[in-house]
Image (cartoon, helix red, strand yellow):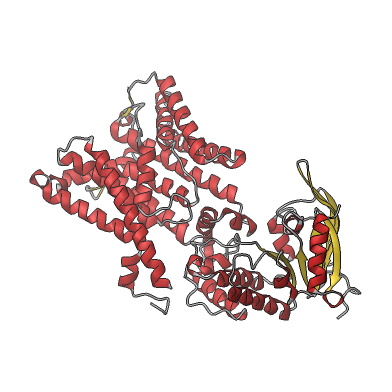
Amino acid sequence: MNDGRMSLGRKLLLSRSSSVLIVLVVLVLGFAILSPEHRFVDPDNLKVLLSLGSEFSIIALGVGLLMVCGEFDLSVGSILVFCSFVFLRLFEAQVPLFFVALTTILVGAALGIINGLITVRAQIPSFVTTLGTMMMWRGLALLFSGGEQKGCDVSTVPSRYFLPFFTGRIGGVFPAQAFWFIVFAVFLGILLHYHRFGNWIYATGDNRDAARAMGINTDLVKTVCFMIVGVLCGFVACAQIARTACFTSRAGEGWELKAVAASVVGGTSLRGGVGSMVGIFIGALTISVIENGLVVMRIPYFWTYVVFGLVILFSVLSSMYIEKKQREAHR
Amino acid sequence: MERQNGEPLVRMVNIHKWFGRVYALRGVDFEVYRGETVGLIGDNGAGKSTLIKILSGYHQADQGEIYFEGQKVRISSPRDARKLGIETVYQEQALAPNLSIARNIFMGREPVRRWGIIDRKVMNEESMKALANLGLRLRSPDLPVVTLSGGERQGVAIARALHFKAKLVILDEPTVALSVKEVEEVLEFVRQLQREGISVIFITHNLYHAYDIAERFVVMARGKKMADVKKKDTSPEELSQLVIKSAFAE
């Protein structure tokens, strides 16, 4: 490989996303073949997988983007539940649904900005900042809601657009959540790979000092990425309540590490500067497939974490191997 | 070559800088003329880096004035410095290793089409052109910088300065951690800058790397300028004596 231009096939094979894709394909085939009566590929299950899984996956996209710029957000589950609570209160106060949803998303954006500002202004590692806000927002949501589950049936209010927007079926089949997952992935993918802001995200994550010396406002870049995560959390809060017709203070529990796992499985570096939206997309899908697949296989839920662990380790090891091969190919 | 008659490109006057209780710069005067290459030498902690970081907008002076092309200027950010035409190549910090060569050269100044979408074709072509101007032939603008040698990396950073029409390029320890062959490569890049008429400040504590290419030497120690001599009036032996003596003098 001396001309620097590799054949497409070889390029694909050597891209970080490929090992993830192989994991995903193996898992999907495995579940499809091994699940009783091939229930994994049953249209009903696929709909469940695509609608439930997409809620988590949408947030994972943002977490991955944030990791590319070198930061973590452990507070996603808590921002989600806090947003859900805001939604509940506004809904109970009979605010028109459009404004309920808009406010919920704006609150998500605000909580993301708070994470960002604390991190960049006080120069605290975001791992710590968001550990703090993770506890705080869930704590407040628990406090205000009394830790209870509350009905929040959006369908009791006449609205032509709200439910179809968040939980509809495109062509009567394809879940709206999955549609939004793809839309967000494409949008964030264009932002990250084709827009100048994406280059700032990479530069900030890869070498913050260089980025700053080149006049990039790295604090702004990071804060915007935190905000994007917050917006996605607010969006998913709306989608989740629309689907379940209730508020639960346990919403989003455990999503923070699952989202990090999805990003890592998708080839994102924990040190920032490395990652792709395709990889994060496939990584998020992989995590959702594992969760759903094990349920369909009737394997006790506790196994989920064992499988997560194995998949994470396998992906990291294989992407390290691919990286090494890649460098050799360049030399 | 007598340059002292003209207006200096940059003139820093009576620059003071405190870091908390540390008195890092104690009233330094420093100037660079057009097309001139100045070797800024001195031991670690002498204040060389602080001085040029003030010039490149990374730090602000607590006291003192900066004149650029005769005009008094305030340089309060790296962006301000670049607008004036001052480009800095920091030691080991100038590039994002996982990003491509082209993305590094245009970092923060990406050529865009509508809606801020990067114009890859322009970016790649211009990158290859900038590298070729420096005499550096790399296979593809898409290669990540991490795959390049140390000398090539400095070349990419210098090509960036060249492409954006710098009037003054500051090289902060550009030869640190390079092999002998790579050092020669970097010196060749600097000669190319000289041929283009660009002023250069070459910071190093290895006098011998700077000796070949600089026309004037400024020796710093403990936050003060200890000497300012033209190459024709000195020798490497005398300079290294100056560096050693001034580091221990009190």
Where's residue B227, x and y in %?
86, 64
Most distant residue in the left direction: A37
Residue B189 visible, this orientation: yes
Q: Is residue A167 left or right of residue A276?
A: left
Q: Determine which quarter of the picture holds residue A248.
A: top left
Q: Tell which of B24 and A82 is nearer to you.
A: B24
Q: Is residue A116 above or below residue A7?
A: above
Q: Who's the residue at 66% across and 75% down the image?
A: B187
Left or right, residue B17 beside residue A107: right
Q: Nearer the viewer, residue A144 or B105?
A: B105
The answer to whether residue B210 is left or right of residue A172 is: right
Q: Quadrant of residue B43?
A: bottom right
Q: Residue at x 57, y 79 (%)?
A: B136
Relative to A203, residue B34 above or below: below
Near-viewer residue (B81 or A55) = B81
In the image, B202: left or right of A280?
A: right
Quadrant showing the N terminus of chain B: bottom right
Whether residue B70 is visible here, answered yes or no, is no
Residue A73: give x, y in percent of width and height: 46, 41
Residue A135 in percent (x, y) is at 45, 29
Q: Is residue B20 above or below residue A182?
A: above
Q: Position of residue A114 (x, y in %)?
A: 54, 36
The residue drawn where x is 47% and y is 51% is: A271
| Residue ranking furthest to the right | B5
